[in-house]
């Protein structure tokens, strides 16, 4: 699943803090792990592209999308 969000520096930093507070890890190579999901992200100017490559078996894609929206909207 891939999602794109408009992003500012302030919103990006706030999202990173929320991810870390939820036990997530952001790696320098542009990958992440949070709540059993993992994938890659790329920030280009005021746009953030996130690709979720792996999710917990019991979590629906709709649930993953909802969590992403909570971090990045």
Image: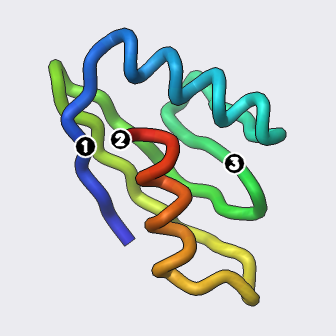
In this view, the residue in front, 37 or 19, is 19
Q: What is the CA distance from the residue labelled 1 to the residue labelled 3?
A: 18 Å
Q: Residue at x 45, y 67 (%)?
A: 65
Name the element at disc 2.
loop
Please identify the residue farthest to the top as the structure is shown. Answer: 10
Relative placement, left or right, of 18 versus 52 is right
**Mark carried by residue 33:** 3
Q: Which mark is residue 5?
A: 1
Q: Nearer the viewer, mark 2 or mark 1?
A: 2
Residue name at image x 58 percent, y 85 percent: 60
Tell me the CA gap for discs 2 and 1.
8 Å
Q: Nearer the viewer, residue 44 or 59?
A: 59
Q: Residues within 10 Å of mark 3 (few under 14, many from 20)?
A: some
Q: Earlier in the sequence, mark 1 or mark 3?
A: 1
Front one among 24 and 22:
22
- In the image, 61: left or right of 1? right
Q: Position of residue 1 (x, y in %)?
A: 38, 72
Q: Residues within 10 Å of mark 1 (few under 14, many from 20)?
A: some
Residue, disc 2: 73
| Residue at image coords 76%, 57% | 35
Rendering coords of residue 38 (x, y %): 63, 57
Disc nearest the viewer among 2 and 3: 2
Placement of 58 over or under 72, stated as above or below: below
- CB atoms of marks 2 and 1 within 8 Å: yes
């Amino acid at each position: 699943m891939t999602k794109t969000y408009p992003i500012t520096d302030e919103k990006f930093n706030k999202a990173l803090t929320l991810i870390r507070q939820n036990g997530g890890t952001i790696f320098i190579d542009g990958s992440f792990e949070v709540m059993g999901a993992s994938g890659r992200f790329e920030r280009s100017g005021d746009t953030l592209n996130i690709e979720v490559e792996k999710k917990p078996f019991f979590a629906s894609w709709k649930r993953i999308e909802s969590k992403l929206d909570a971090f990045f909207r």
